[in-house]
């Protein structure tokens, strides 16, 4: 099984960016932990601050991988193009948000991308990525 994790803008700063919201763990350390927990599956990680690059990655893996875990960051609330890319591919996508988007600013309460995803996890911290992987394993 192959799962692609895709993170959007500013998520490369996890561990140092607003630790009161996002925690102290770097994404690199967390991905290493996920890979050790799920050593029988292939987990690839990609991060970009650029909307078009995220769309390109969705197109690249969206017909060959078994699942995609996507945290589109701020693009969640603004990107019709990423939402359309999710709708255009065959690979199931699970949307993840580290913070509870419904407990934050009102503009974050709307996910343009979520309607095209298999499911949405919000507010479970970094554990949301693990829950997303689990959901893809249980019900691909």
Image (cartoon, rainbow, N blue to C red):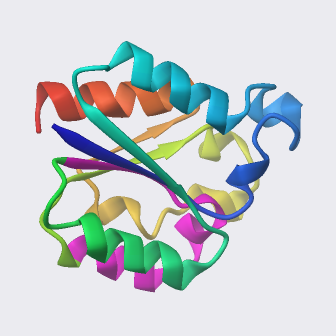
Magenta includes 76? Answer: yes
Relative to 128, say whether 65 is above or below.
below
Residue found 75% across the figure and 35% down from its top: 22
| Res. 115 in view | yes
Residue 51 x/y as whole percent: 56, 79
Residue 9 x/y as whole percent: 68, 64
User: Total marks drawn?
Assistant: 0
Query: Nearest the camera: 122 or 61?
Result: 61
Q: Does 30 sit left or right of 114 as displayed?
A: right
Query: Nearest the camera: 105 or 24?
Result: 24
Residue 55 x/y as whole percent: 42, 78
Magenta includes 84? Answer: yes
Q: Does 95 sit left or right of 126 as displayed?
A: left
| Res. 124 in view | no
Determine the image quadrant of residue 21: top right
Residue 117 x/y as whole percent: 28, 57
Query: Nearest the camera: 29 or 55?
Result: 29
- The quarter of the image holding the N terminus is top left
- The quarter of the image holding the C terminus is top left
Relative to 60, say whether 31 is above or below.
above
Query: Nearest the camera: 82 or 49?
Result: 49
Q: Residue furthest top?
A: 37
Residue found 23% across the figure and 74% down from its top: 87
Residue found 39% across the figure and 71% down from its top: 57
Residue extent of the magenta highlight: 67-87
Relative to 112, say whether 79 is above or below.
below
Which secondary structure dominates the residues rendered in magenta? helix
């Amino acid at each position: 099984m192959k799962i692609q994790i895709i993170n959007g803008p500013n998520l490369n700063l996890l561990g140092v960016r607003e630790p009161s919201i996002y925690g102290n763990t770097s994404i690199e350390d967390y991905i290493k932990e996920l890979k050790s927990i799920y050593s029988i599956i292939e987990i690839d990680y990609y991060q970009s601050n650029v909307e078009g690059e995220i769309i390109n990655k969705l197109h690249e893996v969206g017909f060959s991988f078994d699942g995609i875990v996507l945290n589109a960051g701020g693009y969640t609330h603004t990107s019709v193009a990423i939402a359309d890319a999710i709708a255009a591919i065959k690979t199931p996508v699970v949307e993840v948000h580290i913070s509870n988007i419904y407990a934050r600013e009102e503009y974050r309460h709307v996910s343009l991308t979520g309607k095209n995803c298999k499911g949405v996890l919000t507010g479970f911290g970094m554990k949301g990525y693990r829950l997303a992987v689990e959901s893809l394993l249980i019900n691909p």
